[in-house]
Image: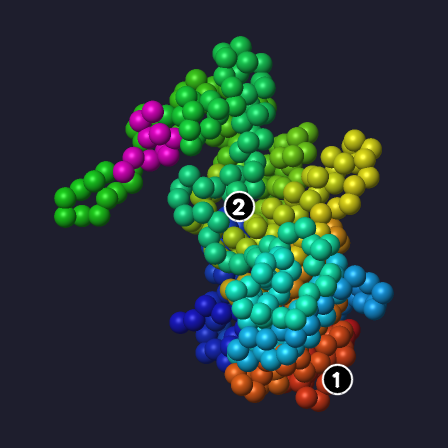
Amino acid sequence: MVVEHDEDTMRAADHILDLGPGAGVHGGEIVAQGTWKEIGKNNASATARLLGSPIRHPSRGQRRPVRKSDPWLKIRGARIRTIRNLDLDLPLHRLNAFSGVSGSGKSTLLHEILLPAASGRKPRERLWKSVAGAETIDRVVEVDQSPIGKTPRSTVATYLGLMDELRTLYAALPEARQAGFTASHFSHNAGPGRCPACDGAGTVRIQMNFLPPADVRCEECGGHRWKQEILSVRYREKSIHDALHLSAEQAAEFFSAQPRLATPCRLLAETGLGYLQLGQTSPTLSGGEAQRLKLVTELAAAQISADQARARGRARRPAHHLFLLEEPTVGLHLADVRRLIDLLHRLVDAGHTVVVIEHHLDVLAEADHLLDLGPESGEAGGRIVTQGTPEHVAACPASRTAPFLRSHLTRSAKP
């Protein structure tokens, strides 16, 4: 039994169970089952629909132009392990991708050359001769699928920074002000408003002899985390506990009059994470969900900052971040891959630069600039075989990626 999204693996399977129809609370049902041909006839299966309708590349009709006159990040003489005297040119404010066989040097180039060079770090040993263009990058962000938090106190709302906004909103309500409640009263991690029996955790840990400890619902607050007088304060008939049980889709509508709350929730919904509850604990998120949540957080911060600048009538240079991702499509369904691609494009539209290591052909085919490493792995790799648009790379006879990319581009171009 294998959990897989790869089309070739699904075609080779003797029997497929297709779950859905959506994600999270919208899923959990067996939508279709049988052989690949039987699954493909079921219109209720999102898997069948998406594989039957490949993405047209470029999905936006045209790629962002890459010109010599544009700003570039240029690293000269990069040298570490199998990478020997490599010159790297990356167009900024574009979607860049690294391709190549496993072991060709992609991760080494991204993490051990590009990351420190763009961050302005000085390595202990000389890993390059010169770096130019990094001065325009305000921040380098590595986005992986590692958990965003390891304890139940970490939630979607705390990671997005929504808890501060919720606490401020509820503390400003007339009944809260009349009772003398401040924003600290609406914190379940600290402050006088949290349940004293469970310290705002909602659960109490019971230590047992000869057995592992067990977490049980707090009897005093019923798992609600706050004292009853705090829960009696309501915004549009909902307590802060009720608000945290809203999904991102519901919260975007419920808090439509509060842009700092509604904007991140709307972005979550637009990127396929609308089913996540604001109070959902971080350890329950999958790696793909955590990764997209990190990207949405960055995008929301940029959008809120731009909205505030426009409201004040002040023109300001938007922040320029360099996002580094390694194989973000691991574990993602094709529907999620499409949402991820859209999210990466939106980051570039916001003025950022994205560099992604990927083997998924849909991602490679969407790049503004594709850099193919190899030609083989280990000592036979570490060189730039070709670079340019995906169409240019697909035409290179020396590239191991080219025949697969060429076939994919041809297939996606068919009506």
Provide residue 374's location: percent of width, then percent of height: 61, 82
Q: Quadrant of the N terminus?
A: bottom left
Callout 2, which amino acid? Leu
Q: Residue at x 49, y 36 (%)?
A: 245
Answer yes or no: is residue 335 visible: no
Q: Is residue 23 inside the magenta stretch?
A: no
Q: Which residues are magenta?
A: 196-205
Label 1 neighbour load within 10 Å: few <14, some 14-19, many 20+: some
Answer yes or no: is residue 289 visible: yes
Q: Which residue is mark 1?
A: 395
Q: Residue at x 43, y 17 (%)?
A: 229
Residue mark closest to the camera, 2 vs 1: 1
Q: In which quadrant of the rendered view does residue 73 lie?
A: bottom right
Provide residue 332's location: percent of width, then percent of height: 55, 63
Of 160 and 253, the residue lying toward us: 160
Q: Residue at x 70, y 39 (%)?
A: 305
Secondary structure at badge 1 equals loop
Q: Residue at x 23, y 38 (%)?
A: 206
Judged from this view, the residue extending furthest toward the bottom is: 397
Q: In which quadrant of the rendered view does residue 263 lie?
A: top right
Say whether disc 2 or disc 1 marks the residue closer to the N-terminus. 2
Residue 276 has which mark? Answer: 2
Provide residue 122's location: percent of width, then percent of height: 58, 61
Label 2 neighbour load within 10 Å: few <14, some 14-19, many 20+: many
Q: In which quadrant of the rendered view does residue 414 lie?
A: bottom right
